[in-house]
Image (cartoon, rainbow, N blue to C red):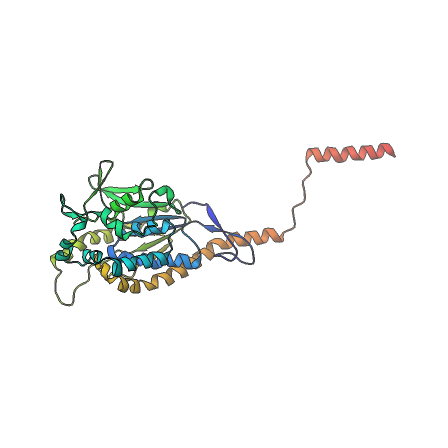
Amino acid sequence: MGSSASETSASGAGGTNGVPAKRPRIGLALGGGGARGLAHIPALEAFDELGIKPDVIAGTSIGAIIGAAYASGLSGAEIRAHTQEVLTQRLSLVRELFNARSQAVNKVLGFFNARSALLDPHALLDIVMPPRTARDFNDLQIPLKIVATGFYKQEAVVFTSGSVKRAVAASMALPVIFEPIVIDGVAMIDGGLANPLPFDLISQEADIIVAVDVTGAPTPSPDRSHPTAFEVLFSSPFIFERTIVHEKLKSSRPDILIEGGTSHFQTLDFLKVEEILTAARPVKDKLKAQLARVLSCETLPEIEAAKQAAALPPPPSIPTEKSRKKRFGRKRAAKAKA
């Protein structure tokens, strides 16, 4: 990981008794997981309540949507309010879109591309992305990396420049639901199929890596002994993603790993926004506690070094050749006068 650090005041994390400390650079990875990814919101609120911001963000799928809004300068509370408005109040079309019924999906004709008969992610983003989200990566307040998957090359594609909306659209283009996004001749699909928790992308750019994992597993229904065809269709990609995350964590782990606590919700459970946010409430307290602890440990050496430097008397000046000649000259002049 990088060794550069951000300055923080004594009243912030790691500062004591007026001694300034260097806050370690923090990287934040927001994973993919459909509706379960609403758990990212309380994680952002944890940063806000601690009065700190990540120095770099990486996001996949819904993590890209929420990460782009946060990197644009919106607070976690603002993102929460916008999400609740969109999914519960503003547009019934959005509610129907995520109603997890083929009949409801067919009603949302305004989002359909007639040629492919799949949903256009750009059209959806016009509604769900907060209006203040930056248009271009250059306009972001926090550096951002967005992950998509190259369909034919079968590897992750990382966006760090150009149109934010286009990159997010590619990152969230989940097969079956959304049509692929073609950028510079490359067909892109959901980034979670290649890197569902992209903490490795920022490991060299921060001292502390925080990752929020919102992958989930299918939950048996009390009413049926087996899943419906619809459940299998939409849950299968997330089985792959969860497997990728588990294998990835065997070889490398972020400094702070937070589970979203929403694994029992399904991919398209966006209409359960209030239930998901309630289930994810512990995320904020867990992250605040872990961040505060890690930051205090990381900044303590800086503080102690500053205290010791302040307590020690200044080192004796070492005479230079020039100063010695000056003193010798003054002595000879004094003797001559005598």
Point 30% across, 65% down: residue? 278
x and y, in percent, of residue 47 in the image: 40, 56
x and y, in percent, of residue 148 in the image: 26, 44
Viewer-side residue, 286 vs 127: 127
Point 18% across, 58% down: residue? 96
Point 42% across, 52% down: residue? 53
Viewer-side residue, 197 vs 128: 128
x and y, in percent, of residue 314 in the image: 65, 48
Q: Quadrant of residue 91?
A: bottom left
- The residue most toward the right is 338
In the image: residue 228, left or right of residue 93:
left
Q: Quadrant of residue 329?
A: top right
Residue 106 vertical placement versus 320 (above, below): below
How many marks overall?
0
Say if residue 259 shows up in the picture: no
Residue 4 vertical placement versus 279 (above, below): above
Quarter of the picture holding the C terminus? top right
Say if residue 288 shows up in the picture: yes
Residue 233 vertical placement versus 335 (above, below): below
- The residue most toward the bottom is 222
x and y, in percent, of residue 51 in the image: 44, 57
Viewer-side residue, 197 vs 69: 69
